[in-house]
Amino acid sequence: MARSVVEVRAAEDSRTVIVAVHDALDLQSAPVVRESLGEVLGQGWEVIVIDLHDVEFMDSTGLGVLIGARRRSQDAGIKLILARPGRATHRLLVMTGMHRHFKISKKVPSGAGTAA
């Protein structure tokens, strides 16, 4: 059974949700990731952590999804964190200057719970 591109799970603190993106964040997966983030943004979480650890490839479309999520989270007063970006993903964020616009963390909050 293939793993989903996006996995959503609540963190232990009940204010935080973790959105783990798997494989690629590109033209093909962008609609699914965008839809999942849109749903999460409307659920009243105070903090959204996008875990990028398993993202092997991200293109400009994927970057656009993250920028859109950042804009929507700011408008809603929600803290958005990019967690554990891989080397290539981090490099793309730096090359585009977007690393200055996101809070980037080397780890995900401990105690991630079950699917939300």
Image (cartoon, helix red, strand yellow):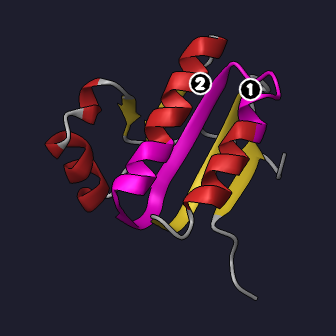
Query: Was residue 64 drawn as part of the magenta stretch in this picture?
Result: yes
Q: Residue at x 39, y 35 (%)?
A: 105
Q: Tell me the kind of residue under disc 1.
A: Asp
Q: Residue at x 55, y 66 (%)?
A: 22
Find residue 45 and report its horizontal and vertical position in percent. 75, 24
> Where 115 sits versus 18, above or below?
below
SS at mark 1 in the image = loop
Find residue 50 and report its horizontal and vertical position in percent. 54, 43
Q: Residues within 10 Å of mark 1 (few under 14, many from 20)?
A: few
Q: Residue at x 84, y 45 (%)?
A: 116
**Residue 86 seen by the camera:** yes
Read off the magenta span. Answer: 39-65
Label 1: which residue?
13
Find residue 43 and report its horizontal and vertical position in percent. 82, 28
Extreme residue in the bottom direction: 1
Q: Which picture quadrant has residue 2?
A: bottom right
Using the image as rendered, state which of residue 101 and residue 18 is in the foreground: 101
> Where 65 sits versus 57, above or below?
above
Q: Residue at x 25, y 60 (%)?
A: 88
Label 2: which residue?
72
Q: Residues within 10 Å of mark 2 (few under 14, many from 20)?
A: some
Q: Quadrant of the N terminus?
A: bottom right
Work out whether mark 2 precedes mark 1 in sequence or the reverse, and give the earlier one.
1
Q: Tell me the kind of residue under disc 2.
A: Arg
